[in-house]
């Protein structure tokens, strides 16, 4: 599998991932947080997490546009969008409420994944 094929497969997987994450954050924020390794949230934390749902749905839409249209500007926009997420999960991993074993590492790896996607999608935009 080539690098381009791997990036395109990753993009398709992110459509599904962000669609599920965004929908779950809106419909069942406490349960979604639990799956992610977070302790039972306070009501304000639950609502703050719920407000991220539309953000992730926007990410899903951006991945879908890049998949369907695939223009240079779509990949470039997606690279920038993923770039905005590089530090967010690493910062969240510092929360004392993220307590399930492996959850902090998972969030840090999500940051690394966003960095890799930003670089990879930027590379695709130059092809």
Image: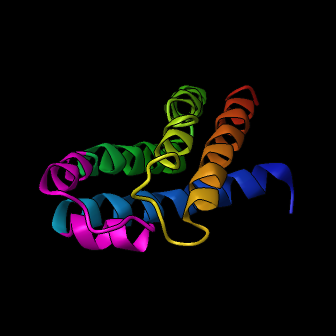
Q: Is residue 44 left or right of residue 65?
A: left
Give, as a single range, the part of the protein colored magenta. 28-51
Total labels: the figure holds 0
The foreground one among 97 and 106 is 97
The foreground one among 4 and 13 is 13
Vertical relation: 39 (above or below) 3? below
Residue 20: percent from the left, percent from the top? Answer: 36, 67
The picture quadrant where one finds residue 40 is bottom left
Based on the picture, tell me whether residue 5 belongs to the magenta stretch.
no
Based on the picture, tell me whether residue 39 belongs to the magenta stretch.
yes
Q: Main secondary structure of the magenta part?
A: helix
Vertical relation: 117 (above or below) 119? below
Q: Is residue 94 left or right of residue 32?
A: right
Please give the name of the residue rendered at 58% of the width and 36% of the height, measured from the top-left corner: 86
- The quarter of the rendered structure image containing the N terminus is bottom right
Residue 107: percent from the left, percent from the top? Answer: 56, 54
Residue 41: percent from the left, percent from the top? Answer: 24, 61
Q: Is residue 60 left or right of residue 86?
A: left
Please give the name of the residue rendered at 50% of the width and 71% of the height, measured from the top-left corner: 100
């Amino acid at each position: 599998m080539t690098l381009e094929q791997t990036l395109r497969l990753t993009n398709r997987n992110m459509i599904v991932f962000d669609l599920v994450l965004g929908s779950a954050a809106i419909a069942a924020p406490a349960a979604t947080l639990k799956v992610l390794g977070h302790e039972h949230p306070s009501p304000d934390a639950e609502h703050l997490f719920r407000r991220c749902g539309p953000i992730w749905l926007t990410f899903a839409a951006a991945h879908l546009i890049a998949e369907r249209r695939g223009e240079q500007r779509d990949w470039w926009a997606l690279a920038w969008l993923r770039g905005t997420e590089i530090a967010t999960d690493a910062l969240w991993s510092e929360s004392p409420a993220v307590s399930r074993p492996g959850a902090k590492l998972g969030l840090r790896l999500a940051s690394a994944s966003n960095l890799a996607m930003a670089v990879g999608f930027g590379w695709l935009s130059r092809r």
